[in-house]
Image (cartoon, grey):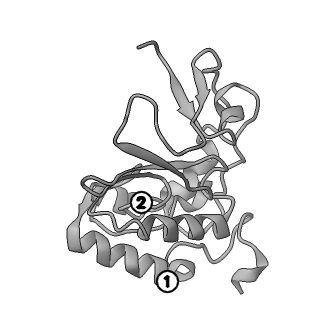
Amino acid sequence: MGRAVYAHPLEIPYITNETSYLEPDPTVAGGLVAKLSKYFPNEPIDLSGYVHELPVDGTIPHMPDWKWYHTPGHTPGHVSLFRESDNTLIAGDAFTTVKQDEMFEVIKQEKEINGPPKYFTPDWKAAENSVKKLASLNPLHAVTGHGIPMLGDELQQELDKLTRNFQEIAVPEHGKYVREEKD
């Protein structure tokens, strides 16, 4: 098997050196990590010789038991992976299991489901819909881009709480990507 990177078509410009991600938003409510986000890189990378579009049927090449789901919000082409045989979810940054914008919480790593990183999420409505989509899969195991894995009843309860209270838990009170409809 040769080297390959599979991505959603909307993510490909960011990994083929065509487009930079949007600027982070250090003005969102949050702690030190959010404030420092203005220094985080958002430039595209060039993997163009290796990039392939994910198949439209939701399958993942070389991973026969897994399906991908388009879960935008954090980025336009964000995807999450799910394996139905054991209800395992790789959520990426569709949601996190730590309050990612606060340094103390990142250090502490106490399990708590939150939305995607506030300082790097430009589309909150899409992010909310993505969380609802993932919760409807009823995962029993979840690994996220930030935080430690969460399992079983704890995962189910926390995902339910996040889907019911997404606006209060995940969406910042203010920021350049927060739409007026929040109010």
Above or below, comparing residue 24 to residue 171 in the picture: above
In which quadrant of the rendered view does residue 153 lie? Answer: bottom left
Q: Which residue is drawn at 58% across and 50% down?
A: 37
| Label 1 crowd (10 A; few <14 / some 14-19 / many >=20) | few
In which quadrant of the rendered view does residue 120 lie? Answer: bottom right
Judging by the rendered image, the residue that carries numbered circle 2 is 96
Q: Residue at x 47, y 16 (%)?
A: 3
Q: Is mark 2 in CB contact (under 8 Å) with mark 1?
A: no
> What residue type is disc 2 on?
Thr
Q: In which quarter of the image is the N terminus?
A: top left
Q: Quadrant of the C terminus?
A: bottom right
Q: Percent from the top left, x then y, of residue 7?
A: 58, 35
Nearest the viewer among 174 and 67 is 67
Nearest the viewer among 59 and 25 is 59
Question: Element under label 1?
Answer: loop
Nearest the viewer among 98 and 153 is 153
Judging by the rendered image, the residue that carries numbered circle 1 is 165
